Image: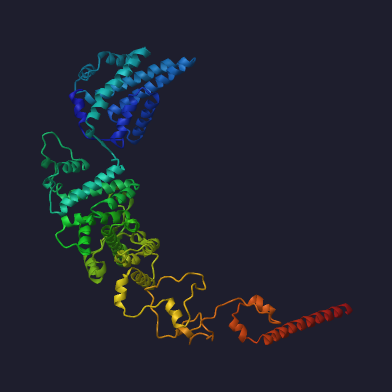
């Protein structure tokens, strides 16, 4: 291929395909012997042309030539199956002539120098003279070249493009830069791994990319940031001033990852899964010991975690509002996790994220509406990295807030104007309370504070008290109280009755409850059923022995059969009731009702007779 053409292809250009594999697939389909694959490649190139009207010269020529070949095969098949229109061959001659002429015109525009003729240009590019003559005859002669010769020209042009465009670019794929970088799940993982690796160097006081001894990591960073290395170029010359600083590289890698995820939100789930699987997010004990000279406490562990991840998690919350989703996933993982150390790290993360959301809620409640700047559509298009409203909060306001709210001081300052992004659903609170472990108390208070809908303060206190009783070790409860703890068995003994084998509800006597204390200052033996000792003064007192069991009323007292159907009474009550008096009262009531009915009938009859007489 000529030097001029090489110079053209050495330039980095914008192209309409999404990623290099798409371009390679089209190349393979064009030069296959399968008409269906060739038709698919033609349709794909038409799609490229819809995206970008001016295609690269190599693609434009291939598009027109492969179209001619597809039509030619279809027409040839029709002619073999039966008679075809008389103009079919002439139409094919016109199509082939136009395709060959446009091929030579495109190539000459790319490679011809000033003063070059078509023949000199063709000689430089190894294009035979007969093809130039064929072009001249197609353009100026009264008779078109034969279809057989034109087919030979089309085949030659396609083979020339394969050797000088498609294969040449395939050897050097870094020459091709797509408009939109394709982010597969693997690509997301690659970006996150690079971010973590460079961040690890940065928090260990490395300043510049040149300080990193890992050559593979340096090359991968340059690849992700599209830094091109020319032959005989020093690596240090590639990075301009300040661009080689690790803090700037970390920011650029993170921003490129977030921009790609904004274009494809389906990658968010993959990103969260990778974060939760990362050893820097939930580090093992050895990882923390090697990187920390201080004694491992909850405070030192959380400090290291926040120092490492805050530059990533704060923009993640501001752009996508993912703290609630991250908390939800951590709560579920906490239930399934068996390792105590990992449970501790998860609990610390849940608490930190909930504190950050509570901090955002409190600050946003104090921010006046004019400080929340909604970006217009044009500005959003220009600033692809900004999708959320900009929250302008003065530094002094933040400092004052931290002093007044010490419990929220250490939360991430990730402000978003979205209530859902600053709260967790009550379902997460319920799941955490119903599946507690020894670390649940580390985050329960902060989780309750960001629940949506809001949980009343009294309910919060009761939940925390319940969980503290539930999770409190048995030994500590025994040490705290010197009182004797009694059970239902003791109540039976105090009442003077033996312990029954079964209770009236049919369950066996269970083990002693170590969480219940017997109030010995009350006389439980004489307390009526259904009333507690301290309720005697405020309730109607029934003088009934506590050992009486309740049964259905079965006595057949004369005149009181109706009671048997409507009341459920104990034998004790049956003995105390004056049943004849009750029956007499019922009889009197019934007699009065009958008399009332008789009087009503007589009045109606008298009124009817009066009407008949009148």
Q: Nearer the viewer, residue 277 or 307?
A: 277
Residue 421 at x, y = what percent? 34, 59
- Res 159 visible: yes
Q: Position of residue 22 (x, y in %)?
A: 32, 34
Q: Quadrant of residue 54?
A: top left
Quarter holding the C terminus?
Answer: bottom right
Image height check: is 81 above or below 201? above
Name the spot of residue 402 as percent of width and height, x first: 23, 68
Quarter of the figure that contains the N terminus: top left
Asked whether 35 or 426 is in front, the reply is 426
Above or below, 287 against 398 in this view is: above
Quarter of the view holding residue 35: top left
Q: What's the image's color scheme?
A: rainbow
Residue, far right: 613
Name the spot of residue 351 as percent of width and height, x first: 29, 63
Q: Do we see residue 144 in this rendering?
A: no
x 32%, y 24%: residue: 31
Residue at 16% x, 63% y: name it. 295
Asked if residue 301 is positioned above or below residue 554 in the image, the reply reads above
Number of marks in picture? 0
**For this view, does 382 lie left or right of residue 7?**
right
Q: Using the image as rendered, state which of residue 154 and residue 353 is in the foreground.
A: 353
For the residue pair 254 and 303, the one nearer the viewer reads as 303
Residue that appears at 21% across and 50% down: 196
User: Is 500 situated left or right of 606 in this image?
Assistant: left
Q: Is residue 274 above or below residue 237?
A: below
């Amino acid at each position: 291929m000529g030097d001029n053409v090489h110079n053209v292809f050495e330039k980095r250009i914008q192209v309409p395909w999404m990623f290099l594999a798409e371009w390679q697939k089209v190349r393979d389909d064009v030069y296959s012997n399968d008409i269906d694959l060739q038709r698919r490649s033609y349709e794909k190139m038409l799609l490229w042309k819809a995206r970008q009207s001016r295609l690269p010269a190599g693609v434009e020529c291939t598009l027109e030539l492969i179209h001619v070949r597809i039509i030619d095969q279809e027409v040839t098949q029709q002619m073999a199956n039966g008679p075809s229109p008389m103009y079919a061959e002439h139409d094919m001659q016109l199509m082939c002539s136009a395709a060959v002429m446009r091929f030579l015109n495109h190539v000459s525009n790319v490679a011809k120098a000033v003063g070059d003729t078509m023949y000199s240009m063709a000689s430089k590019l190894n294009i035979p003279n007969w093809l130039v003559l064929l072009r001249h005859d197609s353009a100026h002669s009264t008779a078109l070249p034969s279809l057989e010769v034109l087919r030979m020209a089309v085949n030659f042009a396609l083979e020339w493009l394969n050797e000088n465009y498609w294969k040449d670019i395939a050897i050097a794929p870094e020459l091709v830069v797509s408009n939109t970088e394709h982010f597969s799940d693997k690509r997301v993982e690659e970006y996150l791994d690079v971010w973590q690796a460079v961040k690890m160097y940065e928090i260990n006081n490395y300043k510049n990319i040149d300080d990193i001894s890992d050559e593979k990591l340096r090359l991968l960073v340059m690849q992700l940031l599209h830094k091109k290395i020319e032959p005989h170029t020093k690596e240090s010359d590639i990075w301009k001033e300040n661009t080689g600083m690790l803090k700037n590289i970390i920011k650029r890698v993170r921003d490129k990852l977030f921009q790609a995820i904004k274009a494809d939100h389906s990658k968010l789930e993959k990103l969260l899964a990778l974060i939760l699987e990362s050893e820097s997010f939930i580090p093992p004990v050895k990882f923390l010991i090697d990187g920390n000279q201080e004694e491992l406490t909850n405070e030192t562990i959380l400090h290291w975690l926040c120092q490492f991840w805050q530059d990533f998690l704060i923009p993640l919350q501001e752009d996508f509002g993912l703290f609630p989703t991250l908390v939800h996933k951590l709560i579920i993982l906490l239930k399934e996790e068996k390792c105590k150390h990992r449970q501790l790290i998860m609990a610390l993360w849940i608490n930190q994220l909930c504190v950050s959301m509570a901090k955002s809620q409190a600050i946003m409640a104090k921010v006046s509406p004019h400080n929340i700047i909604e970006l217009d559509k044009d500005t959003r298009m220009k600033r692809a990295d900004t999708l959320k409203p900009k929250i302008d909060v003065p530094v002094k306001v933040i400092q004052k807030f931290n002093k007044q709210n010490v419990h929220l001081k250490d939360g991430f300052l990730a402000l978003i104007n979205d209530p859902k992004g600053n709260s967790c659903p009550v379902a997460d609170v319920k799941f955490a309370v119903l599946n507690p472990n020894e670390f649940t108390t580390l985050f329960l208070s902060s989780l309750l504070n960001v629940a949506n809908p809001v949980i009343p303060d009294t309910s919060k206190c009761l939940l925390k008290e319940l969980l503290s009783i539930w999770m409190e070790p048995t030994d500590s409860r025994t040490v705290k109280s010197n009182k004797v703890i009694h059970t239902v068995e003791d109540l039976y003994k105090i009442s003077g009755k033996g312990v029954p084998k079964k209770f009236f509800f049919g369950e066996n006597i269970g083990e002693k409850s170590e969480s219940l204390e017997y109030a010995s200052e009350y006389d439980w033996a004489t307390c009526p059923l259904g009333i507690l000792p301290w309720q005697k003064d405020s309730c109607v007192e029934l003088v009934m022995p506590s050992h009486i069991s309740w049964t259905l009323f079965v006595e057949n007292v004369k005149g009181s059969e109706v009671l048997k159907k409507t009341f459920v009474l104990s034998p004790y009550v049956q003995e105390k009731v004056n049943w004849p008096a009750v029956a007499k009262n019922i009889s009197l009531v019934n007699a009065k009702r009958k008399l009332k009915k008789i009087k009503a009938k007589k009045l109606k009859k008298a009124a009817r007779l009066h009407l008949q007489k009148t």
